[in-house]
Amino acid sequence: MGWPAITRRLCAGAVVCLALSWGEATLAQPPERVVSINLCTDQLAMMLAAPGQLVSISRISHDPNMSVMLEEAKRYPTNLGQAEEVFRLEPDLVLAVSFSSPYTVGLLRRLGVEVAQLPLANSLDEIPQNIREIGRLLGREVQAEELAAQFKSDLARLRGAQPETRRAALHYANNYTSGVNSMAHEILTAAGFENVAAEAGLSGGGVLAMERLVMLMPDLIISGQPYPGTSRSEEVLHHPAMKALRENHASGALSDAEWVCGTPAVLRAIARLIALHDGS
Amino acid sequence: MRRALLAVLAVLVLALFSVSLLIGPAGLAPAEALLALIRGDALAETLVMREIRLPRALLAVLVGAALGLAGAAMQGYLRNPLAEPGLIGVSGSAALGAVIALQTGFAAAHMLALPFAALAGAVLAVLIILALAGPRGGSITLILAGIAVSALAGALTALVLNLSPNPFAAAEIVFWMMGSLQDRSMTHVWIAAPFIALGGAVLLLQGRKFDALTLGEDAAASMGVHLGRLRLALVLGVASMVGAATAVAGAIGFVGLVVPHILRPFVGARPSALLPASALGGAALVLMADIAVRVILPTRDLKLGVLTAIVGAPLFFHLIYKTRMQGQL
């Protein structure tokens, strides 16, 4: 199954959620003005919120390089995630993540604003939990349950289509990579690739020296997407050694916004990776 | 004495160059590494040796030679042991030029834009320093002018990097201010080598004139030294070397201070002998620093300038103290 099919399904799910929203009776008082200050909570909130419930999302969701729901996101005003501007939006719930600035979160809480911090999803199995958590916070449990179930069945279908195992390397700016216990590793594994960073003993995110990466001879090199402007950090992505490796041994691919957040968008990343098996 | 010193330094550079080639996280055995470098039949090992370690070792030699020689030349011209490209802001200004070329996109459009922009930054700094410090290079004005130029160049570099749309750029301020050879490539070698070779040749040819200058400007002029031309050669030579070195490796301080200071007693304070010795000594020092950063913190990209400053700053204290004792400060 290609990723357009999954997209359609996800969008259909979202539409159903929105359509259902008017008739829903809510248990506890659901929040009426929700502000999200993180890219990943933006996505889940946009998928689940009732019309008018989500009043602002983070500015980064309007960045075409980072946002997987750009068109949807364009309908919402943005914030820079600073306590002052968020407070002025008079939210009754702020959605943040566990690594959001503790100063911002602390200040908002001192000002009496309710802030929910979503834990970082490091595995595919945590995604349904996060969907349900956002659903609970927004008072949209039914929609969340539906989205979570959809995600689980889509994921199971993709995993079932798993072809032979090849070895892949994730290569980001500054030779950063992801080992076991990371979402990127889970995406690779679900698509039937072995992660060479795991072979090198890396857990979570970390630096794998280019020398070691070259010695591991991956069959596929997934590079970080290029950002506008230039930086020395990103020069490693087209270092002659990496270029030569791509020309003589490995195939190349780009990682993008779909890899970033623990949301149903990762299914599209997995589907594109699976398509690479067929293409080579 | 002079030949022996140069021979010893050359052997030291060669030895350190070999060690630099054999050190790295890939964990290649020395024989295997050399075989891969020379024969090039195993893909992974050959890439590691030829594309990652070789350019790094070559750049350490080039950058070190550039900084050592430029330091010795500036000290010869100003007759002041405190004149050092890093301390007086020449490296910082070269970094500013390089950063502007990179962030405006010129460097991506033209291969030579990066070294030329760094060179332009360095030329500007040398001219400001020479104008402020005057031909005699009094220590106080030299150091004060250097502080001002360094501070301004550093601030503007930080500003340009903070204005970049690239999320990584701002974090690279530390690279431009401290320098590193991590993950450089042969492309960088080809960018820097011609400028460093040219600047080096220009400066080495001025050796006898610097010798004459030790007797004073009038004596030098009476011996046929054209001071204006010497000054031009100094500006272009230093800017070319420091500019190219900084464009690819960032600003690495204190090399031009430490190396001439250590070698001066061996050459009897003759600039013509000190210049080539300082080039070799600089290469050895940067090779040592670059080996040390990989041994101390193999995975962290510790900056070269951190080590050179730890070695160089105490020496700088000593030089200031000595200069004050001699009543020149």
Image (cartoon, rainbow, N blue to C red):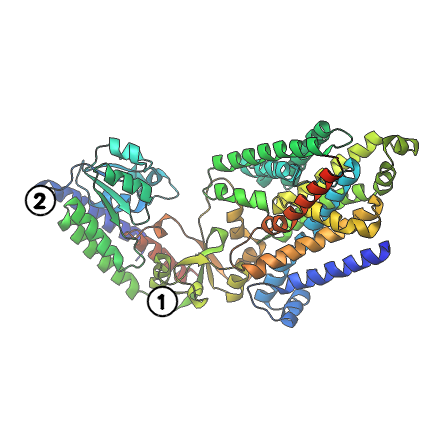
* Number of marks present in the image shown: 2
Mark toward the start of the polypeptide (1 vs 2): 2
Q: Position of residue A223 (x, y in %)?
A: 46, 53
Q: Position of residue B181 (x, y in %)?
A: 60, 52
Crowding near the residue tagged with mark 2, few <14, some 14–19, many ≥20 C-alpha atoms within 10 Å: few
Q: Chain of mark 2?
A: A
Q: Is residue B194 visible?
A: no
Relative placement, left or right, of B168 versus B114 is left
Residue closer to the observer: A55 or B124: B124
Q: Position of residue A96 (x, y in %)?
A: 27, 45
Residue closer to the observer: B289 or B195: B289
Q: Chain of mark 1?
A: A
Q: CA distance from mark 1 to mark 2?
A: 45 Å
Q: Position of residue B104 (x, y in %)?
A: 55, 35
- Quadrant for the N terminus of chain A in the image: bottom left
Q: Secondary structure at mark 2?
A: loop
Q: Secondary structure at mark 1?
A: loop
- Quadrant for the C terminus of chain A in the image: bottom left
Relative placement, left or right, of A194 versus B328 is left
Q: Which mark is residue A163?
A: 1
Q: What amino acid is found at the position of numbered circle 2 in the picture?
A: Thr
- Residue at image location 73% in from the left, 39% down from the top: B325
Residue closer to the observer: B132 or A159: B132
Asked whether the residues under the numbered discs 1 and 2 touch, taking CB atoms below 8 Å apart as contact, a structural biologist would say no
Q: Are marks 1 and 2 on the same chain?
A: yes
Q: Is residue B273 visible?
A: yes
Residue topped by disc 2: A26
Q: What amino acid is found at the position of numbered circle 1 in the picture?
A: Pro
The answer to whether B34 is drawn above or below residue B213 in the figure is: below
Q: Which mark is residue B71?
A: none
Residue closer to the observer: B308 or B42: B308
- Residue at image location 37% in from the left, 39% down from the top: A63
